[in-house]
Amino acid sequence: LWWIQGNIHPKAHWDEASLPYLLKSDVDWEKYTERTDFFNVHGNWEWIDGNVCVYELPLGPHGTCSRAIERLISSKDPEMMLVSLGDSRTRVGGRGKEADESFVPFDKPEINSNGREGPNS
């Protein structure tokens, strides 16, 4: 149901699942990005060679820890030499990932806005 309706069914027994969990096979990159955007599950799913795997469940403790780490990193950078990009999706070869938080040096050139590799992507 998570792939189809975008919700975690209460009877799905995710607490018994081992991660990463294969959610859907034979999915192209465009469909994967469409679904993650539509259901707002950024950072929970990973795309590997056409397979969509759940590698993180959307639970409160993870978000709390993630924000605390981001604040700690930012507090250690008083000169603002790092810029937080928030979560950012990247694709390299047959893999697609989305980090909870990404940092780049302040004067670094912008990344590809579509998250794909190569100059013509």
Image (spheres, helix red, strand yellow):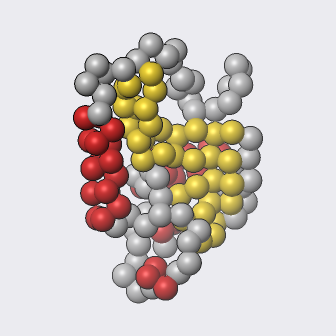
Taking the spot 63% from the left edge, 69% from the top edge, the residue there is 22
The image quarter containing residue 59 is bottom left
Task: Pinpoint residue 39: horizontal percent, then vertical percent.
Answer: 42, 55
Q: Which residue is located at x 62 percent, y 46 percent?
A: 96
The reply, left or right, for residue 7 in relation to residue 110 is left
Q: Is residue 101 visible?
A: yes
- Say how many tags the image has: 0
Write down the quadrant of residue 30 in the picture: top right
Question: Residue at 54% of width from left, 23% of height from top?
Answer: 111
Up-down relation of residue 100 to residue 24 (above or below): above
Residue 16, horizontal then vertical, whole percent: 49, 85
- Is 15 located above or below residue 50 in the figure? below
Residue 83 x, y percent position in the rendering = 37, 26
Give me the residue at 48% from left, 45% from top.
Answer: 99
In-image side of 119 versus 58 (left or right): right
Residue 38 can be seen in this image: no
Would you place residue 45 above or below residue 97 in this image? below
Q: Name the image quarter holding residue 114.
A: top right
Residue 110 lies, in percent from the top left, at 50, 18
Quadrant assignment for the C terminus: top right
Pick the front one: 61 or 75: 75
